[in-house]
Amino acid sequence: MSNIPVHVAGGKYVVRVEPSLLPKLYRQLRPLGLAKRKLFVVTTPEIWALWHKPFLASFPKGKDAPCILFLPSGERYKRLSALEKLADELVQAQARRDSLLLAFGGGVVGDLAGFLAAIYMRGIPYVQVPTTYLAQIDSSVGGKTGVNLRTGKNLIGSFHHPATVLTDPKLLATLPLRELRSGIMESIKAAVLGDARFFAWLEKNADAMLRGDVDALAYAIRVSVGIKARIVSADEYESGQRMLLNLGHTVGHAIEAATQYRALRHGEAIAWGMIAAVRLAAARAALPANDAARIERLIHHFGPLPRFSATAQRLLDLTSADKKNRSDTRNFVLPVKIGKAIVTSDVTTQELHRAIQSMMQAVRETGA
Ligand SMILES: NC(=O)c1ccc[n+]([C@@H]2O[C@H](COP(=O)([O-])OP(=O)(O)OC[C@H]3O[C@@H](n4cnc5c(N)ncnc54)[C@H](O)[C@@H]3O)[C@@H](O)[C@H]2O)c1
Ligand SMILES: [Zn+2]
């Protein structure tokens, strides 16, 4: 159960989730035929300072040791300029088409290094070694890679699947608690849209996860990855089912944009967005009231969610700018019961406006 397959057009790859995998990384590359390649690691100085010893433990030393390249940490470096700099460094370090890139970091490193691998010499293989909860359950799986433009997030990119994803939940020991809580919101999302049993498990094991219990985290990561892998395997390029993964994201993205991506972590904005979606679904009696209450309670259990200020109208306007809206139909992911969500296109502007108003009421009452 620690190997989760992801099926894609070109074949399949495996996400391996196992505590203490980090000191054994190199061994995982051998069965994939990747160990003989020249190895390059993209990471940040902070992550490298914390984890370079176990990371390097299994790799050859001396002239065959991997070459380490650094990206400064922060979303503001997820840009073409940083990518170009790393590409030049790869050339200088003689990376070739048959080299292998390892992305060792959170979603920023994973997205940028994955995109670098997608376009360096028209594409080289790469492996994800994710270090944040969000990256372990979400961004490392599914093959979406890219960078931000000044005009918007993730607007340049490509689909490029990793050769494998090697996930060690023990890496989360040094992750700031707010990053962990924020990442867990995407697990709640996965449970709401696809797995009622997992939702009940999260209700029971929330405190163990927040304490950093490795077995609890490993279990939650495996199940969350399994849900995403199942959906991505059925719809690699987001033409249908994959849209379900956008539960909470229509309003969540609007909140991120309205607050200039500063006030909230991504998962926190998505948590508020899920509350809006839950209230919209409950208002049209598509979601039982008891399920709505359980979802909001679980979200707040992994809170507190930060307060922010924005008018409902402004958020509504920003939802129309969401690139995931196709033409004039409003695609919206509606939870219909715990464990099931659907994509509808009949959500009216007025309904969404009311749901956002109701969510803003919650922001004022319960936001920290
Ligand atoms: N490709 C996808 O499908 C996908 C999905 C969701 C999100 N994303 C992208 O992911 C990015 C956000 O990723 P993130 O939340 O991982 O943020 P991040 O990569 O910025 O990491 C968050 C912070 O945690 C620190 N950190 C990382 N690992 C650590 C560790 N083990 N110990 C201590 N500190 C650690 C980082 O230095 C950083 O300060 C966004 O750019 C988003 O667009 C992509
Ligand atoms: Zn998300």
Image: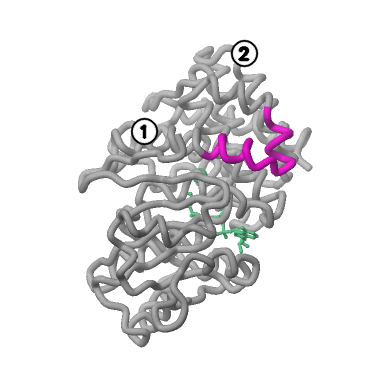
Kindly state the secondary structure of the residue where label 1 is placed: helix
- Name the residue tied to disc 1: 230
Report the magenta residues as a range: 205-221
Taken as a whole, is the magenta stretch helix, strand or loop?
Answer: helix
Q: Colour mode?
A: one colour
What mark, if any, has residue 289 been given in the picture?
A: 2
Circle 1 Cα neighbour tier, 10 Å, few/some/many (<14 / 14–19 / ≥20): some
Circle 2 Cα neighbour tier, 10 Å, few/some/many (<14 / 14–19 / ≥20): some
Residue 208 position, x and y percent, is 71, 35
> Where is residue 157, by image quadrant?
bottom left
Indicate which quadrant contains ligand 1. Answer: bottom right
Name the residue located 32 percent from the left edge and 84 percent from the top edge.
Answer: 94
> Where is residue 90, by image quadrant?
bottom left
Residue 40 position, x and y percent, is 40, 73
> Badges 1 and 2: C-beta atoms under 8 Å apart?
no
> Where is residue 203, by image quadrant?
top right
